[in-house]
Amino acid sequence: MFKYLNIAIFKNNAFNRRGFGLIETTIALFLGSFLAVTVAGVFIIGLKGFRELKRKEYVQAEAIFIADSFVNMVKQGERFKAPDPATLEIILPDLTVRTIALDGESIELDGKTLNSARVKVTALTFTPLTNSVRISAALESVSGDEAFSFTTSAAKRNNL
């Protein structure tokens, strides 16, 4: 009775088997793990690049803040003295003296630290001119090798 039925479950040839064998499963597992390792590697490289970029951005932002602070102080000043190249004394119109100085790896404004702990100052030079001051500074990230330097000039305000 069964020899006339053409039912696939009674045939024993290789083309009618269902599912994956051991070789197909092993190949799929290998390809999947290769893809996962590749994606993880690209993600890690991107994350490192992002962190480096954030450190550079932080050092630049710190340098801009320090430069703006110096320029604002100089604009308020009436006269300038530089007892040494890393110290600037700004004499205000009311004869108050404000002092900006390099103290180790930080900048101090009247005894208070101006830069954050994540950035160290490697160089600071003030050059008083007739009615202005040339300021040069170099900053470096404490956690990485990112560095930023700037030179700017700031002039006192003209009182008309």
Image (cartoon, helix red, strand yellow):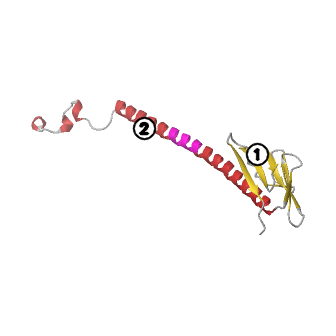
Circle nearer the viewer, 2 or 1: 1
* 43 within the magenta span: yes
At 19% from the left edge and 35% from the top edge, which residue is drawn? 10
Three-letter code for the amino acid on which mark 1 is drawn: Lys
Residue 84: % across, % down: 87, 46
Residue 24: % across, % down: 35, 33
* Left or right: 62 in relation to 24: right
Comes first in the chain, label 2 or label 1: 2
Which quadrant is the C terminus positioned in? bottom right
Total residue callouts: 2
* Of residues 112 and 26, the one drawn nearer to the viewer in this rendering: 112
* Of residues 40 and 84, the one drawn nearer to the viewer in this rendering: 84
At 68% from the left edge and 48% from the top edge, which residue is drawn? 59
Residue marked by disc 2: 32
Three-letter code for the amino acid on which mark 2 is drawn: Gly
Extreme bottom residue here? 160
Callout 2: few (<14), some (14-19), or many (20+) C-alpha neighbours within 10 Å? few
Residue marked by disc 1: 120
Q: Which mark is residue 101?
A: none
Extent of the magenta region = 40-49
Instruction: Name the secondary structure under disc 2.
Output: helix
Which quadrant of the view contains residue 29? top left
Callout 1: few (<14), some (14-19), or many (20+) C-alpha neighbours within 10 Å? many
Residue 3: % across, % down: 11, 34
Instruction: Name the secondary structure under disc 1.
Output: strand
* 109 within the magenta span: no
* Left or right: 118 in relation to 14: right
Q: Is residue 44 above or below residue 93?
A: above
At 77% from the left edge and 50% from the top edge, which residue is drawn? 134
At 80% from the left edge and 57% from the top edge, which residue is drawn? 131
